[in-house]
Amino acid sequence: MSAVKAFLNALRNKDLEALAEATALRAPREATPKNRDLFTAILEKRMTEEGLSELATKLEGFEVSFYDNPTSTGIWKIGLTKATPDGNTLRRMIITRKEKAGWKVLDISGQGEVEKPVAVPRGGGRRR
């Protein structure tokens, strides 16, 4: 989880050097096609201030909340969540990869939303 925390802290501080350090070298090749240019720009340290701010805004307020077990291929999925004002929960996954230098961010999933559960009264809601 240290890779994810380092990545998120670098975004909060808008520190491109630290962001590149927390990014997997294979990200430009192994990330989903829509994220490859993003990770290429991060690793080549040519991400614009606008692009950095946009990414920081997308991940603002998300916190590490759950994780899967690492796979034998050195991949570990870390779940991020963020509560919304209406009681729903936003979710994203960050995929990390083990490299010689340690765990690094490989990819970021799209955002999903989990609606707040509806409370059912005891007895299944039946009237007596």
Image (cartoon, rainbow, N blue to C red):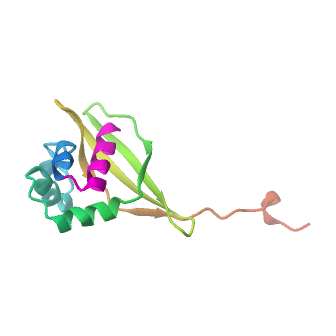
- In the image, residue 20 lies in the stretch drawn in magenta: no
Q: Is residue 50 above or below residue 12?
A: below
Where, quadrant-wise, is the C terminus in this rendering? bottom right
When asked about the image quadrant of residue 96, the answer is top left
| Image-based side of 20 in relation to 84, left or right | left
Residue 82 in the figure: left or right of residue 97: right
* Residue 37 x/y as whole percent: 13, 60
Give whichever of 46, 115 is nearer the camera: 46
Q: Is residue 112 left or right of residue 17?
A: right
Q: Position of residue 113 (x, y in %)?
A: 46, 64
Please report the bounds of the magenta region as a residue range.
1-15
Q: Residue at x 56, y 70 (%)?
A: 86
Q: Is residue 37 left or right of residue 79?
A: left
Relative to 72, say whether 5 is above or below.
below
* Count of labels in the image: 0
- Asked whether residue 4 is drawn in magenta, I would say yes
